[in-house]
Image (cartoon, rainbow, N blue to C red):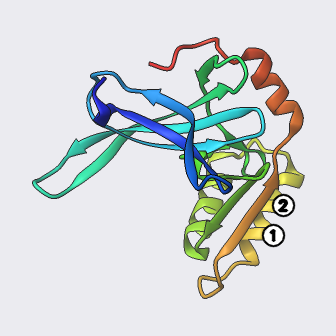
């Protein structure tokens, strides 16, 4: 097995001062990828990005895909995570967003303003109450504000549905 194409999520055992493997994804002999993992109560989630070399020193990531794997059955599938509050906007790199059953995002005010403007522009069919909430939120933000922390508890029924349906597609 080519070690450069295998990555593992480890747990630290304080009593023995050891790292213990918890989840491993083998990329076999596929082209180089960048990846990240998150551990959820019933799932492992991750993002896989293909690395493209732009010059001698720089790589960029392209074609990001997110996957989720049931911890008990090890069945997995690709998935997309959406932000209901932002009109169903897809959350990029969701494996970076999970902490203890919550979605957490730290975002600069200028970026948040641009995202809210885009959501309002692209989603004219949202309910009036949602448009008003998003507009009020947008109008409360100034570019000189401190960063915003977006925090949301993950819905249990969403994870139950994933658990029931996980495995409907392959990882590669």
Q: Is residue 128 above or below residue 25?
A: below
Residue farthest left in this picture: 56
Under circle 1, the secondary element is helix
Instruction: Determine crowd level at label 2: few under 14, some 14-19, many 20+ residues with C-alpha closer than 10 A.
Output: few
* Horizontal side of residue 25 vs 156, given as left or right: left
Q: Is residue 28 above or below residue 124?
A: above
Q: Is residue 23 above or below residue 129?
A: above
* Horizontal side of residue 6 vs 100, given as left or right: left
Residue 109's quadrant in the figure?
Answer: bottom right
Instruction: Determine crowd level at label 1: few under 14, some 14-19, many 20+ residues with C-alpha closer than 10 A.
Output: few
Residue farthest front in this picture: 16
* Horizontal side of residue 67 vs 126, given as left or right: left
Residue farthest bottom in this picture: 144
Q: Is residue 152 above or below residue 68?
A: below
Q: Position of residue 106 (x, y in %)?
A: 63, 67
Residue at the (81%, 23%) spot, across then down: 161
Which residue does the numbered mark 1 point to in the structure image? Answer: 136
Q: Position of residue 144 (x, y in %)?
A: 60, 88
Q: Are marks 1 and 2 in contact (CB under 8 Å)?
A: yes
Residue farthest top in this picture: 168
Residue at the (47%, 29%) spot, across then down: 25
Between 14 and 165, the one nearer to me in the picture = 14
Q: Position of residue 165 (x, y in %)?
A: 74, 16
**Which part of the image, by quadrant, shows the N terminus?**
top left
The image's mark for residue 132 is: 2
Between 126 and 88, the one nearer to me in the picture = 88
Between 112 and 25, the one nearer to me in the picture = 25
Q: Position of residue 143 (x, y in %)?
A: 59, 82
The image's mark for residue 52 is: none
């Amino acid at each position: 097995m080519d070690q450069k194409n295998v990555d593992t999520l480890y747990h630290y055992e304080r009593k023995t001062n050891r790292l213990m493997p918890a989840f491993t994804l083998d990329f076999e002999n596929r082209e180089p990828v960048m990846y990240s993992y998150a551990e959820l109560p019933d799932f492992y989630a991750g993002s896989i990005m293909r690395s493209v070399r732009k010059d001698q020193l720089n790589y960029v990531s392209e074609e990001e895909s997110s996957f989720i794997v049931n911890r008990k059955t090890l069945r997995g599938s690709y998935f997309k995570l959406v932000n209901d509050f932002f009109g169903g906007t897809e959350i990029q790199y969701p494996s970076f967003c999970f902490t203890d059953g919550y979605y957490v995002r730290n975002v600069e005010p200028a970026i948040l303003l641009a995202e809210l403007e885009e959501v309002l522009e692209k989603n004219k069919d949202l309910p009036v109450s949602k448009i008003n909430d998003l507009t009020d939120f947008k109008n409360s933000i100034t570019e000189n504000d401190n960063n915003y922390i977006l925090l949301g508890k993950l819905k249990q029924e969403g994870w139950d549905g994933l658990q029931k349906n996980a495995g409907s597609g392959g990882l590669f």
